[in-house]
Amino acid sequence: MFDLSAHPGRIYVLATLLPLVPAAVILLVGMVRHLAGRHAPTTAGAYLSVACLLASAGMAGWGAVTYFGEVERLPAAEVEARWGERFDWIRIGGSVTDQPAAVLPVGYRIDRLSALMFSMVTGIGSLIFLFALGYMADEKKSVPLPPQGEGLGVGGSHSDHSPPHPHPLSPGGEGSRRGRFDRFFLYLSLFAFSMLNLLVADNLFQVFVSWELVGVCSFFLIGFYYERRSAGTAANKAFIVNRVGDAGFLVGMAVAFAAFGTLNIADLNAKFDTNHPQDISHTLWIVLGLGIFLGAVGKSAQVPLQTWLPDAMEGPTPVSALIHAATMVAAGVYLVGRCYPMFAPEVLLVIAYIGLVTLFISATTALVMTDIKRVLAYSTCSQLGYMMLALGVGGWTAGLLHLLTHAFFKALLFLCAGSVIHGLHHEQDLRRMGGLRRKMPITAYTMLVGVLAISGAPLLSGWYSKDQILSSALGFGMANTEHFLLFVGPLLTAALTAFYMFRLWFLAFGGEPRDRKLYDHAHESPAVMTIPLMILAVFSVGVAWGWPIWDAEASALGKLLHAGQPHGHGLKLDQAHKLAEANHLLAGGLALAAAAVGIGYAWVRYGKQAPTPAQLAEPTGLLANRWYFDDVYDAAFVNRTVDAAHLSANVDRANPDRKAEGVPSLDGLMNSAATLAARGGDALRAVQTGRIRVYVLALALTTIGLLGMLFAFIR
């Protein structure tokens, strides 16, 4: 099956399937051990998970080098045949009718974008898996449950004062549970497989299957500490909110299949390659694009479905890094990039404005967050907004370059946050930190690299992609002056990003300790956790370099992407592209000025002098309440659903023998049917006398009656 001479693309199939091996081994070994009465977690499965993903990363690297080498020297048709295959999976109809069968295929297709994304996911995923070996070490043994109102486990945040419950299989008894070290890596491996299958899928149906697997794995991982009600609630919220987006994705798939009879992404893109196809009306073209984009809105946490992502911080920090950098939230932007020609110009404009609103709202919310992980969570929402805005204004290369560069420095930032939490024995409140650069120098200065990269500091990876995004936005705004806000918004947010990220660094690592007891117990993380930080710091600096490195347009990674950018799909963005190229120095200069203002203001407020009590006070108001999105959703949907459930429960529990205010109970309705049947039986029982003369008389009278009706009808 894996003959690579004729089909080298199969190396990606093998790399995709590898993470299933540790998942299957951990599951089977766990079942056997459970039946044998041995409940202590094993560690071998975790090391196998790391080894398999490292092997997948090696295969991805070999595949990328081979693929890009063949792209340069072989005809496009031959490359496509060697790096993609499809097989019929389900055939519906066609055997006994003249109509052709409906076919749902399964296949893979490697192009420039999927090859680069695959290498990124496996590479960053391997480092996160390695980091998790140290971070989740407490899960190798029985874990004490927290007192009421405290967080649970490594990296856990605070609960909502729900009472803890011991694990039902725990040998530790009341107040403790068995460790879940093996279970954690089982979920991580499934998560990695789901995302890799999504990347190589050549059709929307297979993408959707992987899409749902990603959602299920995120549910398991966000709710990993399920003894906390807050963790269970966050997992449910992520799952439910994403189902809203998935409903739109299904609509888009249905429209595509009804109009073109295929869900193959390359075939669908070809339909729109030159202009609006004749097989679909303009209205349905818009519906198709909006449906697919709604799926991306859910996965990539765009307004109005962004509320699940910050709450996902209830999971362990390696999960947060994996979700925010390499897997779940990347899927939505990746889908928009893969399906780019399918979006009508009106839909692209919607994408751009949704990205604008998301990047600004999320950045302003991050300004007041005091939990180190929540600052990074809102930062992710904001950066995803940048990517969507870039795609919406025609900056396909810019948006997807930022997706790749962001993955490295956001993984670095989250793992550094995890290192801080580990070193402070699970403390996450920035207001209690300070001065940690002395106790945790590796964590402090690698995180500074990530902070500089996300702020757009020159020559770091984020500078290249942000420069291109703002250039694309400026070009689009100049070509369409009524949409110039699409440039002003991200420019302002660049200053906000630099401010809240340096605010985080100064509060955690700068100045003097604000909690001496906490500081005295702080320590640097072990090598298994700091080595991934140093590797990610190197990539955060140079992954987008080209020659000359001081030219943001010369990024080698950007050039690889740009060669695969869709063209000629009737979006009429040529003028915007020309203006973007002509004014990229202006856009870059303004972006640097905005970042410098943000960094300078953060230095004055939090770095130059110790923060004042007012600056460390509990935030209130619009931003602290996250623009009241959750309150509005609670009032409009959640509370109304709960009210309906209570009403239904009250009706169900009402006394069936009593008419409760004119509203019959469910039990009463069901009992009424039974009572009616019983009374009918009683009535029939009365005529069953057992006397033959009565039966004969009844039969005679019935016969006379029927004959009388017959004669009346004949006349």
Image (cartoon, rainbow, N blue to C red):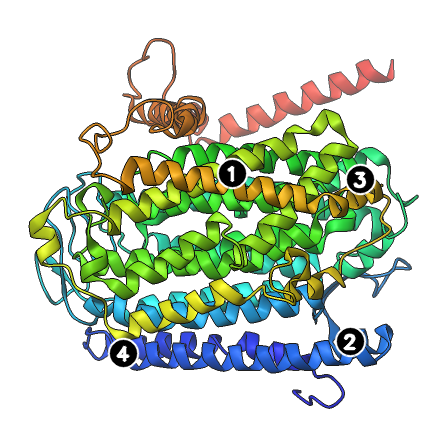
Q: Earlier in the sequence, mark 4 or mark 3?
A: 4
Q: Residue shown at 16%/47% (left/top)?
A: 512
Which residue was labeled with disc 2? 71
Q: Quadrant of the N terminus?
A: bottom right
Where does residue 529 sit, x and y in percent of width and height?
Answer: 30, 70
User: Could you say which disc has been placed on residue 182 in the image?
Assistant: none
Residue 351 placement: quadrant: top right
Of residues 90 and 628, the one nearer the viewer is 628
Alpha-carbon distance for marks 4 and 3?
51 Å
Which residue was labeled with disc 3? 285
**Image depth: mark 4 or mark 2 in front:** 2
Q: Residue shown at 40%/22% (left/top)?
A: 635
Q: Amino acid at mark 2?
A: Val
Q: Earlier in the sequence, mark 3 or mark 1?
A: 3
Alpha-carbon distance for marks 2 and 3?
32 Å
Q: Earlier in the sequence, mark 4 or mark 1?
A: 4
Q: Earlier in the sequence, mark 4 or mark 2?
A: 4
Helix, strand or loop at label 3? It is helix
Q: Is residue 530 left or right of residue 563?
A: left
Which residue was labeled with disc 1? 594
